[in-house]
Image (cartoon, rainbow, N blue to C red):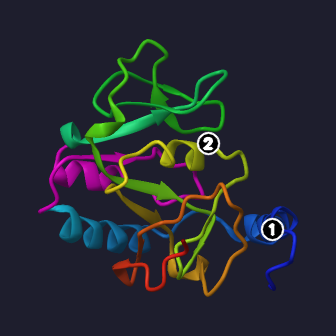
Amino acid sequence: MAVDSDPASAKEAWRKELKPLKTKIDSSSEATVIAHLVTFLQHVAGSFLFYRAMSTELQLDGLADQLGWGRFLVTRTPETGPLTVHPATGSMELHRFGYMQPVETAEPVSLSAISVALVPALAVDRRGNRLGRGAGYYDELLSRLPSDCLRIGVSTEQFIFDELPSETHDVPMTHLASEAGVRAVADPVS
């Protein structure tokens, strides 16, 4: 699919084409991605922001099982406003889209504690552009993280492309994680 001159329209066209292709994740692909992330993260200091997956996203709970849940933080989608960040070890509730999130009364965590953000993606490209679901929650959150925070787009190889459309508010990934391993973005967008 080509990258159109209007990035917003192009992104919607990509979403329309890709969403039907995103089906339940193969457990062997998931295990391979987690193994690569364990190897990459085991010597990284700080806290890791990750996501609680929807059925079409790679589930990273196995990563927290291996590296220790106490190092992991997770987002909450409030009724209004931006995503908030909380310990992954606290009380959880089911979000209306089917994933677990911290309860409304969960204590927030300072974003300055985050050294790595593991970010879900509908698709990513080799330059670090990430195509999300379109609400903009993650880009807004990523823009508030420390500048030295690693931003790892998590996907399967099938959904890593040479080029995706992007807009000025999009926050690029610094790394990609897939069945092929965790690798730095070759030519990051500026």
Element type at mark 1:
helix
Q: Residue at x 26, y 70 (%)?
A: 35
Find residue 80 and name its label.
none
First in residue order: circle 2 vs circle 1: 1
Q: 10 Å neighbourhood of mark 1: few (<14), some, or many (≥20)?
A: some
Q: Residue at x 65, y 57 (%)?
A: 132
> Relative to 109, is 162 above or below?
below
Q: Residue 113, how many percent across, how many down? A: 26, 39
Q: Which residue is mark 2?
A: 137
Closest to the camera, between mark 2 and mark 1, is 1
Verify CB contact (< 8 Å) between mark 2 and mark 1: no
- The quadrant in which the N terminus is found is bottom right
Q: 10 Å neighbourhood of mark 2: few (<14), some, or many (≥20)?
A: some
Highlighted magenta segment, given as a residue range: 43-68
* Displayed quadrant of residue 41: bottom left
Residue type pointed to by label 2: Tyr
Q: Is residue 51 magenta?
A: yes
* Displayed quadrant of residue 176: bottom left
